[in-house]
Every structure is written in structure tokens, then in C-alpha cells.
Image (tube, rainbow, N blue to C red):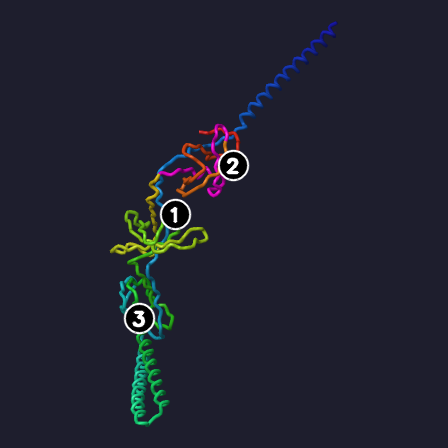
Amino acid sequence: MKKVLYIVIGIAAIGLVAYILMNNKKKNEADTAIVGEKNASIAVRTDTIKLEKIAADYVANGNFIPLQELNFQAENSGRVVKVLVKEGSPVSIGQTLAVIKGDQLSIEVSNANAAYQNALTDSQRYENAFKTGGVTRQQLDQAKLALVNAKAKLQQANITFGDATIKSSINGIVNKKSVEPGTVVAPGTQLFELVNVSKLKLKVTVDESHIATLKVGSTVKVTASVYPDKEFTGKITFIAPKADESLNFPVEIEITNNANNDLKAGMYGTAVFTSAADQTPVLTVSRNAYVGSVSSNQVFVVNGDKVRLTKIVSGRNFGDKVEVLSGLKEGDIVVVSGQINLTDGAQISVVK
């Protein structure tokens, strides 16, 4: 009898354990379903589309270069006998910089001049003789040709002799002096480097979204990194008709230096391009809202607890903001973080 009782109790205990396990399983499945339902939404961050005034001064950087820069080279062989300037000396057009020994050149000028005088005398004698029939027309023509050749040789000798005196052809400053008295030079020997920094050029590149607002002749504010408190005025003198490899357009700005020539060639400069049209409020979207890149022109627009992949038309870039021409309206909410996990129609939860 006791044995049967033990068996009954055992069966009841097993049944109780099975019942408890079954209830636990159902509860776990319900909890899992709830968690799964909660995890079906994707966490994102959002931003609101709005009209705003953009301070859209466009800044471009570059280096100042001199408006004029000349490397003087020797035209003739010889020994330098005088150097009349030093590095840093201001020079003007026609000023003598150095003199190369010209004794041999002077002799050549004398010889060429003597040959010319002889040819001139012969030409005049033949001219008179031709009138009386003493010489033929051919002999007269040959005498005249000899005179022309002698004159050309004399002119060339004078030019060569003149080249022995090195003169500046620009107003500027001696940036580098490569010779000293006694230096023997040959044609092509570097003598001086002259630069004119009374005016300079700032070469910058401008992207296509801003190039349309620029015109040759427009004034531009210019600053130099070493003079943060000084402002210079420049004028656009060149806008490239073709973009470079980076799809930017080279632009040159001419700047008149101040009386102290504070700006130096090689300094780092900044051009600030201002557009009056930028004072009008424009509809903007965060650059982070774009799926992939700005060129994709696609954003996720929030609609309740879901998103809609929307095609838009973008305008100008303003740093972290982009102008919206169509596809969005003021007050629309767009996703700015978490797009990588989204598809059209996906359910979301907004993270503050």
C-alpha cells in the first residue's frame, strides 16, 4: 500500500514540475516576442528643415606671388668689373646693376664703325661715278649692299657692347645677387633675381558652386596670415574657364601693397568672397542628412514612427548646411544619424 502511495506522489511531483516548466516557457516566449517587437524599430537622430539666413562668405586660401619677377642672365662672356647693387636694393627701370669688362667689345665696335665708314665712302663714290658712266649699275648695287651689311654689323656691335652694361628693365627689389666683381661669366650665367612687390597676385581655387557669383574686376577682401589685423583690397583679374583636376577653378587676385611693402611674395593669404544674395533666407538641410553623399540627393523624411526615402534637389553648399531647392518644405523632419540601418518604410525610434 505504501509503495503505491509513493508512486502516486512521484507522478504528481513530476506533473507539477512539468506544469511549472511549461508556464515558464510560455512566459519566456511572450517576453521574447515583446523584446522582438521593441527591437524592430531603429534608433535614429533627426533634424528639422527650416528657413535661415546664411552667412555665406566664401573663403579661399593661397600664396602671394610677385606681379613681376625677372631672372637676369649674362648676354656675353667676360669678367664682371662692377656690381652696383646688393640684395635688398630697390632698383628702377634703366638703372645699371653691373658692368662686364668690355675692352674686346669696344674694339669690335671700333672695327665695325670703320668698316661702315669705308662702305659709306665707297657707296658715295660709286654713286657719283655711275652718273658719269664710270661704273655699271651692278657695281653701284653691290656698293649699296655692302653699306647695308656694314651698318647692320655696326648696330649689332653696339648692341653687344651695350649688353656689357646690365640694366634693370623693371622697378623692383634685388632679391638675389649671384655675382661679385671679378666673376667670369658666360652667356646664360645667372646674375640677378629682381621682384616687384608693389603689386602682388594671390592665386586661389574656387569650387563650382561659388564660381558663378564671381566676375573679373570685382573687389575682394584679402588678409595675410602674418597680419591678422590688417585688411587689403584686391581685384579679380583672372577666372579660369576650365576647372582643375579637383573640379575647382583657379582665380587670380591682384593686390596693391601698402607703402611699407608689408606683403611679401610667398606669404600665406586668404581671400574672402562676399555675395549680397546670401542675405535672403534659404531652405537648408544638414549635410549629415544625405544618404551616402550630397550628390545622391536622397534623404530619409520622418513620417510618424516610420521613414520615407525622398529625392530632393540641392543647391549651394554652406559648410555643414546645404540649400534645398525642392523636395522638402519648412518643418519637415529628416534623419541625420542612423541612415545606414534604414530602408524605405522602416520603423524608427528617435533618440534625443
Which residue is disc 1 drawn over?
A: 210
Which residue is disc 3 drawn over?
A: 166
User: Which mark is first along the chain, 2 or 3?
Assistant: 3
Along the line of sight, the residue nearer the viewer: 138 or 251: 138
Query: Which amino acid type corresponds to the residue marked 2 in the rendered image?
Result: Ile
Instruction: Decide: is 213 above or below 305.
Output: below
From the viewer's perspective, is the residue at label 3 or at label 1 nearer? 1
Along the line of sight, the residue nearer the viewer: 296 or 267: 296
Confirm whether residue 332 shows in the render. Answer: yes
Q: Is residue 97 magenta?
A: no
Instruction: Decide: is 59 above or below 141.
Output: above
Q: Position of residue 20 (x, y in %)?
A: 63, 15
Rendered residue at 34%/82% (across/down): 148
Rendered residue at 32%/59% (across/down): 67
Q: Residues within 10 Å of mark 3 (few under 14, many from 20)?
A: many
Q: Which residues are magenta?
A: 281-306
Along the line of sight, the residue nearer the viewer: 5 or 92: 92
Q: Position of residue 189 (x, y in %)?
A: 37, 70
User: Which mark is first along the chain, 1 or 2?
Assistant: 1
From the viewer's perspective, is the residue at label 3 or at label 2 nearer? 2
Q: Position of residue 220 (x, y in %)?
A: 32, 50
Which residue is disc 2 drawn over?
A: 340
The image quadrant that residue 86 belongs to is bottom left
The image quadrant that residue 21 belongs to is top right
Q: Position of residue 306 (x, y in %)?
A: 50, 30
Numbered circle sitting on residue 265: none
Rendered residue at 32%/94% (across/down): 133
